[in-house]
Image (spheres, grey):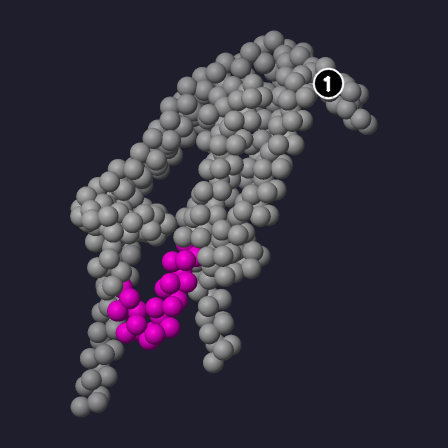
Amino acid sequence: MDTSWDTQRIARTALIVAVVALAVWMLWRFVPALAWAVVLAIATWPLRQWLARRGMGKTAIAGVLTLILAIVLVLPLIRLGVQAARDSGAIVQWVDGVRQHGLGTPGWLSHLPYVGGSAAAWWQENLAQPGAAQALLGHAEISGLVGFTRRLGIELANRLTVLVFTVLTLFFLYRDGPSVTDEAQRITERLFGPPGRRLGKNAVAAVRGTVNGLVLVGLGEGVLLGIAYAVSGLPHAVLLGLVTAVLAMVPFGTPVVYVACALYLLASSQTAAAIALLAFGTIVVFVADHFVRPILIGSSTRLPFLWVLLGIFGGLESFGLIGLFLGPAIISVLIAIWREGAET
């Protein structure tokens, strides 16, 4: 009798594993959309609960929140794609103009300490003269730039497809989330006992804290630096602010944008504006990375900032952009298991 029961349990376990593996294999291309939907649902779940306490029906809540997030997520991507397509023609013309007519040496370059003279001489020899500029930029063929623009358009189209499935999944998560959560908690407790519920809560808190620490802080950096770009007189300040907000979600990503903008201002002989932008950007990033972000993430996950940083970079390298949020969740569960084992 015991042997028959063990055989049935093994067969049932094997069937469950096989069905789950087959489902993952079948839905593999949609896993990023499902993962993003879960992350966004976890991050905005307090808003759903607030609307539910106000008496809204679950279908109405799902519709309202899905519409809001669709506008917030899809419209910036469409704007970025349209702006990239529009600016690509200007970039191609600029490169072609530099190759034909050269690029004049900035007046400030020769005044740089130690390297100013040699840098100005190199610029004059390799960029200022039309023939030299054409030789230096010989590898930057127009067809290559056009091909890059085409690949960028295809990549944006793929991202838009993922966003569509993410938004569709979000609607059903908002509508049926409470019942799905209850079922998941019962299954987790049945498999792992009472500690399973605590581990799940730690993972959810880690995802929500990481979203707050990365996305909200990134948006704040994008807004502040976007205003700075506009004040500095940079073209396309709104687009630059959007790019800054996206890169700010990756640790140490923001300096890539504002330093490049400061170098552009230097090349345009706007030294004071470049220095001011560089100083303001450094202050914003320093405050965000050393004070605001650790408080938002660490207070939710009870993780030291070093482990949060390792989770972010490890998740980013292993899972791509979604790993920014999955990495800290995995590390949070690992640390919770460690602490629970140390206490017993």
Q: Residue at x 28, y 66 (%)?
A: 185
Pick out the residue farthest to the right.
114
The percent coordinates of residue 333 (x first, y second) are 44, 64
For the stretch drawn in magenta, the main secondary structure is helix
The percent coordinates of residue 241 (x first, y second) are 49, 30
Foreground residue, 14 or 251?
Answer: 251
Foreground residue, 262 or 233?
Answer: 233
Q: Residue at x 59, y 42 (%)?
A: 287
Q: Quadrant of residue 2?
A: bottom left
- Secondary structure under tag 1 reads loop
Q: Residue at x 37, y 26 (%)?
A: 79
Foreground residue, 343 or 105?
Answer: 343
Residue 313 magenta-highlighted: no
Q: Residues within 10 Å of mark 1 (few under 14, many from 20)?
A: some
Going by the numbered disc 1, the residue's amino acid type is Trp
Residues in magenta?
184-207
Residue 199 magenta-highlighted: yes
In the displayed structure, 176 sits above or below 197; it is above
Foreground residue, 138 or 171?
Answer: 171
Q: Quadrant of residue 330?
A: bottom left
Q: Residue at x 47, y 80 (%)?
A: 344
The percent coordinates of residue 93 (x first, y second) are 50, 14
Query: From where the camera sits, is residue 169 visible?
Result: no
**Left of 40 or right of it: where is 61?**
left
Q: Disc 1 designates what residue? A: 108
The quadrant of the rendering that contains the N terminus is: bottom left
**Left of 60 or right of it: where is 21?**
right
In the displayed structure, 37 sits above or below 238; it is below
